[in-house]
Image (spheres, rainbow, N blue to C red):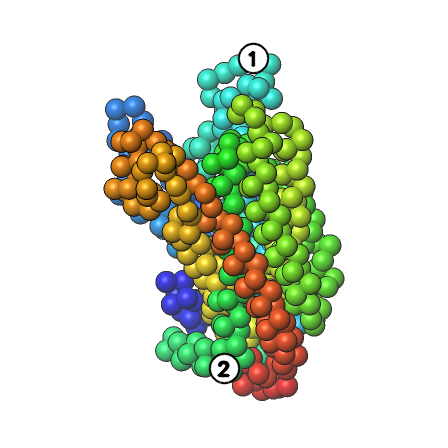
Amino acid sequence: MKLLWAPIVDSVYSPSFGRRKSWLIPTQYLIGLFMLYLSGNVEGWLGGGDVAPNIGVLTFCFFGLSFLAATQDIAVDGWALTMLKRCNVGHASTCNSVGQTAGYFLGYVVFVGLESAEFCNTYLRSTPADTGIITLPGFLYFWGVVFLVTTTLVALFKTERPCDHPSHPEQEMGIMQTYHLLWKIIQLPSIRTTVLILLTCKIGFSACDSVSSLKLIDAGVPKEKLALLAVPMVPLQIILPLVISKYTAGPKPMDIYLKAYPYRLLFGVVAAFLVWVTPFLISGGVVPLYYYVLLIVSYAFHQVTLYCMFVAVMAFFARVSDPAVGGTYMTLLNTLSNLGGNWPSTLALWLVDSFTYRTCSVASVDNDCSSADETQACVEAGGTCNISLDGFYIESLFCFIFGWLWLSWGRNKVKELQRKPDKDWQVVKRRNSR
């Protein structure tokens, strides 16, 4: 849906106000007003006690917020390509990464902590209370006001280059012409190769990224403790993109991607080892402190490799995208990148049980607990179905082997794409075409 909406955002605008500001300013005002409206009604809609939640209204409101946020994302991506000089356009990925991490930390980690009465009573208050320091309505109201104020400042003080500016000349296009250009983008040989790379590059990480945390929970690690591991990672996730920006903002951002790739593959082996050793380290349901230290160190290593790859590929997208249809171009590449991560992870979750081998603890019952009937027969015989080989380890081995095979093939393909001149990525001829 976002990909189909992007050409409209690229083609419909007010030249006097600015191509990107025409969408960004109204969208952010609407987001702010939405939040203010939600702040006064959300508690009633969420229900509680004998009152059922109003699912229909909540769905409509949060769909509206998501739609507005997607529109904002398209406009910001397109504006970044023309706001920054071509030699600095790779810094857009740094801003993206740092902004997303800071937003996640403030909007989720900080909110969940300060909204929790237990957390506030334990760590922040001398006198206990029944509620947290902040509430959901108060949180929405505050950020609604922030959206309105910051949007007003951007509207008043940030100007946008006109479409005929010599540094980033752009052509006025109709809606159908922009959709036609989207089709032309997809037909570019360089994009076709990029599509193949983006849809396959994350297969090697799928077992680790989607299954390992669930296996740790099964092994006895409390899920709330596992979720808290994200908190000490926030400073790393903010600082790391700034540190590597001098490399990703250059002409070869994907060099960082290729260097981080094998280390992220190796972490898949580390994750499998952690899952295997966890039951031996956790005794009687008590998780020792040194185990959490081990998890934090391992998770930090994973985040370094993940963020190096994320910032690098986003910088590459910004470098190759045609500014004339920047919002559509970036949305297409981001959609493909997200799809390339989602489908292998979903498949890994779906197949992990199919690859798991079980046996019944009662020797007289000859079945492998591969179906509901066989499992029931084992239970009726007084036994339990024990895992003899977890499918996670099979998936981890497959992903590791596939990842190395992909790297041996993909390294040269990625470098070849990185060497292509701008004209191989552009779909709109410029007056000063290079």
Name the residue carrying label 2.
188
Residue 232, given in percent of the width and then of the height, sits at 64, 38
Residue 49, given in percent of the width and then of the height, sits at 29, 23
Type of amino acid at the residue the image marks with label 2: Leu
Residue 75, given in percent of the width and then of the height, sits at 50, 62
Is residue 252 left or right of 43 when viewed as pictured? right
**Residue 193 in view of the camera:** yes
Residue 283, given in percent of the width and then of the height, sits at 56, 26
Residue furthest to the front: 364
Q: Considering the image in quadrants, where does the N terminus appear?
A: bottom left
Is residue 149 left or right of 59 when viewed as pictured? right
- Assign a secondary structure to mark 2: loop
Q: CA distance from mark 1 to mark 2?
A: 65 Å
Circle 2: is it few (<14), some (14-19), or many (20+) Cα within 10 Å?
Answer: some
In the displayed structure, 251 sits above or below 236; it is below
Residue drawn at 60 percent across, 51 percent down: 269
Type of amino acid at the residue the image marks with label 1: Thr
Identify the disc placed on residue 127: 1
Residue drawn at 35 percent across, 50 percent down: 63
Q: Quadrant of residue 166?
A: bottom right
